[in-house]
């Protein structure tokens, strides 16, 4: 199932959402201009490598700069590949505009960054020994999805079901679509626990952490008009 769009119109132009999409895209394109060794080094320096912070001796042996916490922020603006970028930016395009609409620009960007930071901390907590760089806006976007889940549960999400590439579209409530998304994240993390290994390619724990913090904190970031309309 591929989401196409939602049915909630925006009252204001989602400038911050557009800027986030532009920044992520530009940084990805700039990263693509680097040769492979330089690109890998860049991802290790500015992506989030959990062992860099949980094992200082290992980090020193491999030449990571000491006491540099910028990767907790920078990692959420970097992406490993085209599919990774397009999936994240598409979800941001569909769902973030309405959250920005009810929060306002400054509240929304603060909310987005907090969700991303807590998502990365959650990833480190559950994958402390990982030596692979984690990148992507998924954790911050998960926070947006958590807010959308509670603010617009009965909005309709138009889904494309790609059966033999036929134009088959259905509408489902946002609460159903996002509920399936959460169940899938839970399936992945519980599978990791059962088989006793870490997931290095996808930060499933970070996704859940971002979703939960977005679901819990979103009401503290609503504009006054939005608070009145939702009470």
Image (cartoon, rainbow, N blue to C red):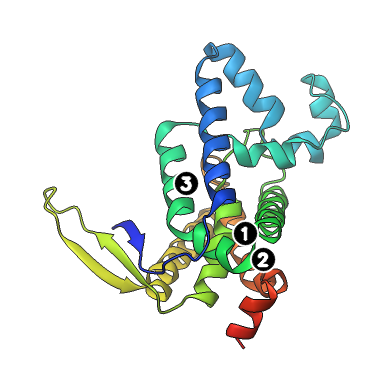
Q: Secondary structure at mark 3?
A: helix
Task: Mark yes or no: residue 184 visible.
Answer: yes
Asked where in the image residue 43 lies, by quadrant, the reply is: top right
Query: How far apart are labels 2 and 1 at the CA level?
Result: 5 Å
Is tag 3's residue or tag 1's residue first in the polypeptide sequence?
Answer: 3
Q: Secondary structure at mark 2?
A: helix
Q: Earlier in the sequence, mark 3 or mark 2?
A: 3
Q: Nearer the viewer, residue 129 or 76?
A: 76
Most distant residue in the right direction: 67
Please identify, in this view, whether the residue under mark 3 or under mark 1 is nearer the observer: 3
Q: Residue at x 69, y 76 (%)?
A: 224
State left or right for residue 48 relative to residue 23: right
Disc 3 to disc 2, how far (Cα)? 18 Å
Q: Residue 128: where, in percent of width, then height?
A: 72, 45
| Residue 213: assigned label | 2
- Identify the residue at horizontal 45%, vertical 77% (top origin): 153
Q: Please provide percent x and percent y for residue 42.
A: 65, 22
Q: Which residue is mark 1?
A: 210
How packed mark 2 is, by other alpha carbons closer than 10 Å (few <14, some 14-19, many 20 or more), is many
Provide the residue designation for mark 3: 88
Residue at 45 percent of width and 31 percent of height: 81
Q: How many marks?
A: 3
Task: Locate residue 217, reporting x and y percent.
Answer: 69, 70
**Residue 163, position in %: x, y?**
14, 54
């Amino acid at each position: 199932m591929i989401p196409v769009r939602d049915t909630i119109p925006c009252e204001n132009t989602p400038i911050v959402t557009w800027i986030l999409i532009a920044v992520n895209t530009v940084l990805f394109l700039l990263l693509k201009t680097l040769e492979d060794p330089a690109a890998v080094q860049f991802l290790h320096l500015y992506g989030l490598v959990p062992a860099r912070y949980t094992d200082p001796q290992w980090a020193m042996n491999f030449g990571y700069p000491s006491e540099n916490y910028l990767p907790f922020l920078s990692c959420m603006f970097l992406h490993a590949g085209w599919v990774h970028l397009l999936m994240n930016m598409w979800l941001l395009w569909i769902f973030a505009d309405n959250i920005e609409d009810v929060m306002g620009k400054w509240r929304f960007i603060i909310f987005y960054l907090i969700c991303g930071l807590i998502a990365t901390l959650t990833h480190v907590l559950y994958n402390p020994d990982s030596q692979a760089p984690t990148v992507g806006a998924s954790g911050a976007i998960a926070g947006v999805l958590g807010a959308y889940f509670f603010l617009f549960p009965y909005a309709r999400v138009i889904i494309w079901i790609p059966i033999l590439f036929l134009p088959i579209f259905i509408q489902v409530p946002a609460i159903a679509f996002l509920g399936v998304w959460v169940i899938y994240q839970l399936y992945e993390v519980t599978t990791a626990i059962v088989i006793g290994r870490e997931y290095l390619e996808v930060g499933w724990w970070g996704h859940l952490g971002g979703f939960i913090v977005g679901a819990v904190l979103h009401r503290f970031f609503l504009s006054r008009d939005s608070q009145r309309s939702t009470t």
